[in-house]
Image: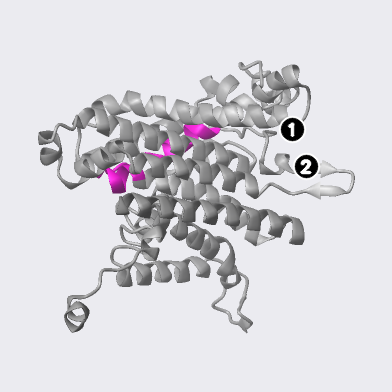
Amino acid sequence: MLEKKRVNTGALLSLFGAVAALALVILLENTIGPTGQLFTVLKKGAVYALVAVSMNLLNGFTGLFSLGQAGFMLLGAYTYAILTVPVAAKDTVYYLYGGSAVKFSLPDLFAGIFGDGMLSLTLGVLVAIVLGGLVAAFFAWLIGLPVLRLKSDYLAIATLGFAEIIRAVFQWQALGPITNGANMITQIPTFSSFNIKTESGTIYLSSAFPMLIMILCLAVIVMLINSSYGRAFKAIREDEIAAEAMGINLPHHKMLSFCISSFFAGVGGALFAMYASNAQAMVYTSTMTYEILLIVVIGGIGSISGSVIATFLYVACSEWWLRGLDSGSFLGIQSDLFRNGFRMVVFSVVIMIVVLFFRRGIMGDREITDLFKKRPRKAAKEAVK
């Protein structure tokens, strides 16, 4: 009973924190304007946080070492982009191939039912995002049939190989009428498409939209981890033999974890396409996967809160706080050392320091709600009483 009460309290605190953060983002964006590095960090941070948590679900909670996250992001991004390019713009976007092989657009389809407006755009975008996740999950199921029989480094190499293969395939000119070959798919709905124009001005929601999608997805992942499936994932991580002896179906649960992780990576890829305003295969390299993996390690393997905190810190440092190191001036200090590329040197040193002093990451395997729990009294204090 006490444990259930603690869980409910933690859920309420998390819900209150999420609503407060979302309200603060909307307030800031409409008070100081949508431009500036702060909102770049919020948008990219929301996307990367979702992908990092999806990787943590697989690597941290299930104990399967996968490096295919960039490939699943690519599938989500291209699915979203292909399905949301306006019909009127397809000939322009696919000009090298005489138009697109996909003759419809989801926002346009909903516009035919509900009329032009925010409702049609929102429904079209949301359906495309979900389909991006489903396509990624489907490919995860296909490659998971042979790949999940591998363990440790072999699984990582196999998934990394899949990501590289899928990136090359999507740039294949024969698929140009669908993927636009090695060219970008542009003119897709972006985060700015959700800004509402009124007679008195514009209500900016471009930063709130990715934050809202991230929060909803994280809520689903948290509920999954706290369910019987999540406990089975953790049991597999700790000891596969013991988990199987307790009646856990290892192939089924591994496949389930792999597909769910890939689904949310695909959703993250669709959001990244919205953030970048295009979809292009050459962006989704293994470097992106390593970047996400680094965030997971810094935040703490097995901690959702750690992945989210580490993501926003990582993006803020790389995209905002250390930018002056590349432009000749940092914190009012002028130096010849502050030239292009020096930012990444300092950033690497900062990451090394964090890894050295936080061996288990910022949060370890704890969550933010654990910080509000009462710690057990020490035996010495009990003895004094």
The CA span between labels 1 and 2 is 8 Å
Give the quadrant of the C terminus.
bottom left
Residue 75, image x, y percentages: 48, 31
Q: Residue at x 48, y 61 (%)?
A: 314
Is 249 in the magenta? no
Q: How is the image coloured?
A: one colour
Q: Which residue is mark 2?
A: 196
Residue 207, image x, y percentages: 65, 50
When the figure is inspected, residue 18 is found, relative to residue 89, above or below; the finding is below
User: Do the numbered discs 1 and 2 sit on residues whose CB atoms are within 8 Å?
Assistant: yes
Q: How many marks?
A: 2
Q: Which residue is mark 1?
A: 118
Residue 157, image x, y percentages: 28, 40
- Name which residue type carries label 2: Ile
When the figure is inspected, residue 82 is found, relative to residue 379, above or below; the finding is above
Give the magenta-colored segment's residue range.
Answer: 57-77
Q: Label 1 neighbourhood size at 10 Å, few (<14), some (14-19), many (20+)?
A: some
Q: Residue at x 67, y 32 (%)?
A: 122
**Quick check: can you spot residue 152?**
no
Is 69 in the magenta? yes
Which corner quadrant of the image does residue 254 belong to? Answer: top left
Mark 2 lies on a secondary structure that is strand
Residue 245 circle label:
none
**Quick check: can you spot residue 182?**
yes
- Name which residue type carries label 1: Met
Q: Is residue 382 left or right of residue 292?
A: left
Which secondary structure is most common in the magenta stretch? Answer: helix
